Image: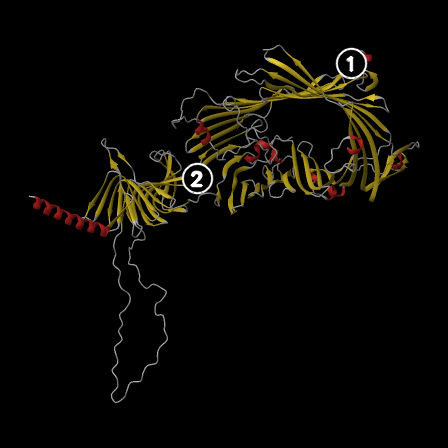
Amino acid sequence: MQQHKRLFIFIVSILVIIFCSWIAESFAFKKAEFWYDIPFGVRDTIKKDSLKKEKPLRGRRPKPEKPKKNIDTIKKKDTIKKTNGALEDVVKYEAKDSIVFNKAGNEIILYNQTNVKYTDIDISAGIDVINYQKGEVYAGRVKDSTGEYSQHPIFKQGNDVIEPDSIRFNYRNQKAIIRNAYTKQDENNVRGQIIKKENDSTYFMKNAIITTAEDLDDPDYYIKVRKAKFVPKKKIIAGFSNMYIVDIPTPLAIPFAYYPMVSGRSSGLIFPTFGEVNNRGYFLQNIGYYFVISDNFDLTLTADYYTNGSYGLRAQSAYLKRYKYSGNFNVAFENNIYSMRGLPDYSGSKMYSIQWSHSKDSKSSPNSSFSASVNLSSNSRYYQESYNQSNTSNFLNNTMMSSISYSKTFPASPSVNLSLSASHSQNTNTKSIDMTLPSMRASVERIYPFAKEGQTKKGLIKSLNLQYSMQADNRFATYDSLFFSKKMFNEAKNGVRHSIPVSTTAKLFKYVTLGLNSSLNETWQFKTIRRKDFNSSIGKSAIDTLSGFDRFLTYNVGASLGTTVYGTFRFKKGAAIQAIRHVMRPSVSYGYTPSFDQYYDYYISDAYGNRNQYSRFEGGLYGTPGLNESQSIGFSLANTFEAKMKQKDSTETEPKKVMLLNSLNFSTNYNVITKELSPINVTGGTALFNGKLGINFGATLNPYAIDNNGRQIDKWNMNNGGSLFRLTNANISTNYSFSNKDRSEKGKKKEKHTGTVAGGRTDDLFGSSKPLNEVQDLDKKKEEDENKDGKQQFYRATIPWDLTLAHSLTYSNQAREGKISNNSLMFSGNVSLTPKWQVGLSSGYDFVNKGFTYTQLRFERDLSSFRMSFQFTPFGYRTSWYFFVGIKASMLSDLKWEKNKEPDRVLR
């Protein structure tokens, strides 16, 4: 019995060894993964030696062969070629439940959470079948006990991911048949009923859909293509395509199509906006092309065309060099024709606009900087007369300003600062333009001649310092009709001024600061005047303009006394207000400027022989030297009020500091020569409710009385039966912005708003400045409406809203008129009625003119893949409305519909 048992164990061992040998030939085991490598035959391409041995000739002895050199007959190039279908790597596979080897069918069956890897290809599925004879892998879903399919296959190759219902993949030739698969290409979701993978970069699809909807099982819209060639990350070339909305076919169809699938920026056509204007006819707006020139630079060219012949051209560019600079540049030209040729109201105008914004990274060059903010136009009413919808929000601006500046610091001892700049200011109401081109500033840092480097600068001598500064300007004052004309350049004013200020400070009686100062100023002018005596034939004195260099020198001296007084009023212990702190900064200053009558001459001003004085430097940039001696004493008092409040949180031991008044300032001047006191200026400001309510106010108090004609007389107002001071004007302005998110966002940093290049407001107090067809980031609102479980909240306990109020009041009483010259209230608000509905209103009321200001109603609806917007201006000379509905995704943003009514032209 024992022998039979040993024989049985021996036979079983032999069988195990044979089975393991067979397994070892085909499989390898490593770290709980089965590696399978299909053997392949290699044909010997090295031909056998076919040379035959030569027989020696009869009667002749063969000559001995010379020894040959050792020649390497092994070629560097391997002549052994791999057979077609040879594997490049090991096929790795694993499964959670079972792996079944079917030797008869040459198959390996993997079940539940399977994974097959080969080179850069990764296939995960519920079930996998590997046919190692054909070199194919079939991946599919599994059905659970309820009959539902789960564990859809996931095919990954590099960065491309496809999730089909099933896939049959040949890992030898890299081809595959995929059914009901979808992939995401940037913003686009692509799903195909049958997909044939030709190679790594080419797929052929049948009955495919393209959409940006998130729900691929039930998309709200899609573009259906019957046959298509798909190149991942590049393009889809399709045959007949048409658009479906909620599975309903629409007449929007094309016989063939090209869909770019490039992620990031790409060049392409900009689809226009269609509309109609009463006095210009039908139009196309913003049609053009977008160019991606490089990673740091792009260009957008757009145009407008109206059927009456009007047109507009625009070029916009943005550039960015990381850690160096960034900016954008816009140029626009419009040829406006009103009405039709031959009609009495026919007219036309041409105008252009230039906008440029540039900023330099301070880290790129710490000792130099360059910045630009340009907004100028040939027509002061450019925004009012432009019909392009993107300019709607800027038509209320009454000032266009520009500035370009470059500065350089030479870090020597003393250091020197040099700056070059150009500026421009354009008033849209008066059509006046003031421009400085160029302007140069140079300065040398303060020099302390009596103090050694690093030594404390105390006392009148050691604190004595001097500085040098220079400014040179070339200024133009003209109107938009003469902008860049010859007359504008001929009337330019220019000059140079040098200044050397000298000052010192010292402490008196420990708490009082004494300051002494003086300044030496020299002015250079390149144009002067000469007044001739009265000419009876022309009835006036002629003025000649003399070109040439001339100069004058002035100086002044001054002194000041100032101190700081602190006062604290404490309340009872346990009170809500623990203390109020009052800081006063009084100061008294004295200034003296002598008479510079040496720069004045006489001329006969009328037919009676009266003589008047004049200076040849009249009309200069920096004024004229003073004819009369000047002595004045200045008084000023600056105040701040701060309170310490008890914290509501009992765990907080330190009181909370609250600013009651940021500033309350009084200032006036007394002229020693004329013995006249100037009006007292009062200014102040504060911020309440955690800085949400800003209040600024000012007033002018005149101590002198006026006569019946409203002219000031040399008599105190109180001696004329009035009060101590006469209130001549006063103003107050408030601005309040709040929302129901203020409490939840308490403590968070607020985003800093930057002004627009066109000079408009960053908020929507004067209406929305965002174009209707601009793709908005509405996904942020959606994220806010999601709870911790990731489910969208369709019902809210609170409705998001925000409100902005601005009020301005001006009182005028120069000649006892006592009237309110300005009293207006501006308001703007937005309410999210539902997670997808938002309503906004911007308007205001002028209480003086008794009428509403510019009013705009806004409606926005998030339609998942679509966005709908409507803006309406119900009254005023800008009466208009705009409607837009389109796809939010940028790739298909040209699938839209816009309709608008432009404002009618109002003759003024």
- Quarter placement of the C terminus: top right
Label 1, residues with CA under 10 Å away: few <14, some 14-19, many ≥20: some
User: What residue is pinned by disc 1?
Assistant: 724
- The residue that disc 2 covers is 892
Q: Position of residue 626 (x, y in %)?
A: 84, 32
Q: Residue at the location (74% across, 43% down)?
A: 489
Quadrant in the picture for residue 261: top left
Name the residue at the right extreme.
Answer: 609
Looking at the picture, tell me which residue is in the foreground, 42 or 178: 42
Q: Is residue 22 above or below residue 804?
A: below
Q: Residue at the location (46% across, 28% down)?
A: 781
**Residue at the image point whose x is 93% and y is 33% from the top:** 609
Element at badge 2?
Answer: loop
**In the rendered structure, which amino acid carries the disc numbered 1?**
Leu
Residue in view at x 31 percent, y 61 percent: 81
User: Of discs 1 and 2, which sits in the foreground?
Assistant: 1
Task: Return the disc, 1 or 2, that comes first in the chain's sequence.
Answer: 1
State the mark number for residue 85: none
Q: Is residue 545 visible?
A: no
Q: Is residue 199 left or right of residue 750?
A: left
Residue extending farthest to the top is 572
Q: Nearer the viewer, residue 395 or 496?
A: 496
